[in-house]
């Protein structure tokens, strides 16, 4: 009995450690090996910039849409090759009136609210440029973001380029923004290494670009369409690149409640994507792409959250049966969850010392997976969702 419990404990430990830390170390080593046996990766240069259409989907964004338009129109890119297109549906605030004050912006509107991907599907037929760039209405891009992102399309094998998401974090931020900021710094590094090894496994909707002729209308029930689109491109044999010098900046979530809402939706979408992209689990067909997808995404949305309670209770059993090693590990687990509880109590406090927020954010993320799974099973997570409120910049 004890031997079986030990085996179960160590298997679950391996799954969690590998999913959140081990894959990062392995990825780093594989990239180092690739660099040692191949030419160093050099950022492509470009002199003849293609025409691009910058598509922004907006719903009730009157607090930020003016700043977004100004930012988009003033990006460092040839003005005669840049079109800004905003698509709105169902907005009930001043968003449309603000957009109308910019005649140089193309605007498509529909009264019924059907969600972001439905809006994009509706307007993509009006895009005539060879490259389309997508970004969110509540983000601002760095000046040379589009120049840096489109240069990768000089390589005919590249089908999609993912930009970097940067969460603006301040010393005064609470648990949500602090945890989100730390998480995205780590995620950005993993994406950079993923891209260098083989392919990014999931673009962030805050900023990515795609060859227009590769965009296929997406099922309007898809919850995380940016993730789905980028993986479909990769499955079709095109390279999905990552460009950290093209980044979209946004504030962190206003509260843990808002961040939890976002994480639950992403988890439900992740489970949905795993089901819809089931062929990608076949490592014999997709090779390195499947390895990256399973290691970076699938484990975090499936086995790793399931393993956490198993680790706790098997560790408790083993600690009661004498081994000092298991007792020490259990004490560390209790300390970790105690830090999570302290982070929960202090979640809205503006602390400079944020060590409690990282365990809390980790626990909250995994709790969100359980909630997201239930929503997926019940079919209660709509692709049209109530966006999370962001912290004040």
Image (cartoon, helix red, strand yellow):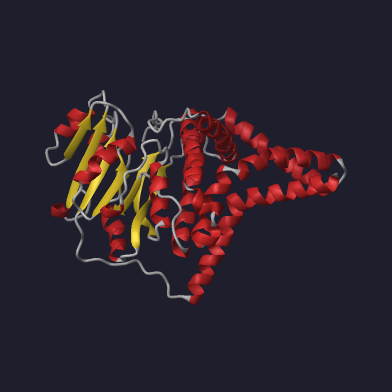
The answer to whether residue 349 shows anywhere in this view is no
Asked whether 9 or 100 is in front, the reply is 9
Asked whether 385 or 37 is in front, the reply is 385
In the displayed structure, would residue 106 be above or below residue 38?
A: above
- Furthest residue in direction right, as rendered: 322
Image-based side of 114 in relation to 264, left or right: left
In the displayed structure, would residue 343 be above or below residue 228?
A: above
Residue 320 at x, y = what percent? 85, 39
Image-based side of 313 in relation to 112, left or right: right
Image-based side of 211 in relation to 244, left or right: left
Residue 107 sits in quarter: top left
Q: Which residue is drawn at 81% across and 39% down?
A: 317
The answer to whether residue 112 shows anywhere in this view is yes
Q: Residue at x 26, y 23 (%)?
A: 92
In the displayed structure, would residue 350 be above or below residue 135?
A: above
Figure label count: 0
Locate the N terminus by quadrant.
Answer: top right
Locate the C terminus by quadrant.
Answer: top left
Residue 182 at x, y = what percent? 50, 45
Residue 63 at x, y = what percent? 28, 30
């Amino acid at each position: 009995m004890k031997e079986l419990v030990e085996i179960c404990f160590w298997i679950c430990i391996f799954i969690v450690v590998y999913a959140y830390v081990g894959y990062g170390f392995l990825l780093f080593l594989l990239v180092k090996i690739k660099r040692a046996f191949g030419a160093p990766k050099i950022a492509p240069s470009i002199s003849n910039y293609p025409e691009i259409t910058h598509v922004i989907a907006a719903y009730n964004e009157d607090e930020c849409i003016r700043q977004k338009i100004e930012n988009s129109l003033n990006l460092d890119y040839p003005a005669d090759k840049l079109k800004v297109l905003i698509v709105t549906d169902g907005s009930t605030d001043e968003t449309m009136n603000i957009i109308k004050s910019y005649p140089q912006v193309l605007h498509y509107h529909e009264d019924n609210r059907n969600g972001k991907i439905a809006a994009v599907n509706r307007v993509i037929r009006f895009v005539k440029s060879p490259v389309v760039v997508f970004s969110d209405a509540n983000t601002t891009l760095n000046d040379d973001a589009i120049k840096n992102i489109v240069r990768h399309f000089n390589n005919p094998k590249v089908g999609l380029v993912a930009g970097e998401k940067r969460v603006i974090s301040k010393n005064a931020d609470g648990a949500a923004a602090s945890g989100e900021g730390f998480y995205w710094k780590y995620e950005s590094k993993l994406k950079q290494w993923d891209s260098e090894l083989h392919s990014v496994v999931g673009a962030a909707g805050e900023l990515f670009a795609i060859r227009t002729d590769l965009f296929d209308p997406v099922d309007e029930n898809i919850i995380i369409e940016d993730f789905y689109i980028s993986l479909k491109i990769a499955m079709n044999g095109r390279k999905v690149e990552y460009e950290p010098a093209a980044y979209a900046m946004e504030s962190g979530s206003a509260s843990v409640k808002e961040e939890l809402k976002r994480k639950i939706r992403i988890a439900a979408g992740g489970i949905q994507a795993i089901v819809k992209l089931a062929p990608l689990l076949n490592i014999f067909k997709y090779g390195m792409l499947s390895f990256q997808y399973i290691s970076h995404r699938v484990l975090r949305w499936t086995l790793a959250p399931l393993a956490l309670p198993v680790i706790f209770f098997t560790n408790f059993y083993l600690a009661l049966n004498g081994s000092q090693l298991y007792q020490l590990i259990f004490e560390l687990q209790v300390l970790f969850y105690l830090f999570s509880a302290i982070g929960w109590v202090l979640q809205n406090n503006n602390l400079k010392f944020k060590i409690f927020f990282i365990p809390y954010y980790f626990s909250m993320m995994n709790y969100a997976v359980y909630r997201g799974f239930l929503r997926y099973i019940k079919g209660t997570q709509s692709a049209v969702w109530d966006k999370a409120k962001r912290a004040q910049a």
